Amino acid sequence: MRAPLLAGFVASITGTAASIGVVLAALTGLQATSGQTASAIFFMLIAYGALSIILSWRFKMPISIVWSTPGAAMLVAAGSLKLGFATAVGGFLVTGLLLMLTGLWPALGKLVSSIPKPIASAMLAGVIFSFCAAPFQSLVAYPLVILPVLLVWLVLYRFAPIWAAPAAVTLAFTLIAMTVKLPSFDVSLLPHLELLAPEFNLAGLFSIALPLYFVTMAGQNIPGVAIMKSFGFEVPFRAALVSTGAATVAGSFFGGFALNLAAISAALNANEHAHKEPGKRWIASVSGGALYLLLALVAVPTVAFVSAVPRELILAAAGVALFPTIVSAFSSATEEPKLRLAAIITFLVGASGVAVAGVGAAFWALLAGVIVWFVTATRDA
């Protein structure tokens, strides 16, 4: 019994530690207040902790639900558009509706998966590129913080890759607390929810909702299903998408964004290290879900601390956490020679940060990549 419990705790701790900086940077970049950010973090941890427990127990398989880390990275890029958090909340709500629709209408999921993986990966690499460059940009101003973090990440990536990002991000926040003079702040230890009114407009649809939906599907849900299948588990697609979509819709009113199937956490909970018997591995994701519920209790002081830290350091910590993501994205983007041109154009548009008519780079990158794909595919034919 101890093996699945330990596997669940490890998956939850590593996943949260590696992604919390990205999520906080995304929400604050979208102009959420510290109270709204704490509300969003609290709701999402409660929601995906509860869903992990309920779905795993109901279907007796290790179904891990988490927030969308690639989606959060995309939202950081969208923050430069200064759309306002109410518009972002409206985009989150639409994303949740699209996730629910995908569960109820599988053809929509097939349409998303029909877009070549290299193009989807290149879009993700493009929008998080400036993020991943942030640690090196901050190295001159904060060498005592950034250099040890980079060294720890590199050493652990060589010998224990799964711990590289969580350990580096944890060290980053520890060094920030020790070496950077922070302004004083008052912290209420009681978690809370703040009800928000969403705003709907075309900028929110094309810069928030559609890119967030696509990245969540292509970067989390589809890989999550594939990873589970590799361990012999057939994820109940409809139940997973409808429940996470509904939770995303509900969470949007409290500042939360997309919830989805886990990918890396899923592998930790579904492999033989969680339990030799596949039929008992669901206990791992249930224990992980319980830990998420406990972590929700420290949402307020965590956000208060991060809000007092210089933004460039938060971006640097988040960038280190995204190193594995961009490595994976680049690998996928260049794996098919016939799609390399389309993928490179997609990456360049995404990395440019271009915004037209209030619509951010993620949408234009995807559009450019698909157009180049169609043109070159026709030539090759």
Image (cartoon, rainbow, N blue to C red):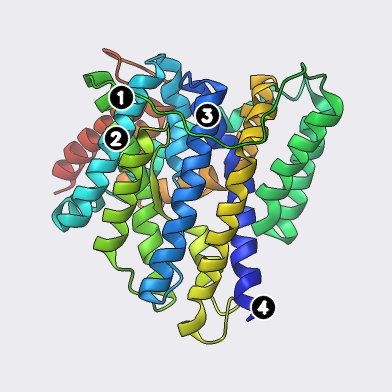
* Contact flag, marks 3 and 2 (Cβ < 8 Å): no
Quarter-of-image position of residue 291: bottom right
Cα–Cα gap, marks 2 and 4:
39 Å
* Contact flag, marks 1 and 2 (Cβ < 8 Å): yes
Give the x, y percent position of residue 11: 59, 61
Amino acid marked by disc 1: Pro
Tell me the residue at 23%/37% (across/down): 370
| Element type at mark 3 | helix
Amino acid marked by disc 3: Thr
Question: Which mark is first along the chain, 1 or 3?
Answer: 3
Residue that badge 4 annotates = 2
Q: Is residue 376 visible?
A: yes
Quarter-of-image position of residue 209: top left
Residue that badge 2 annotates = 93
Tell me the residue at 73%/20% (across/down): 185
Report the disc number at residue 198: 1
Check disc 3: other Cα within 10 Å, few if <14, some if 14-19, many if 20+.
Answer: many
| Element type at mark 2 | helix
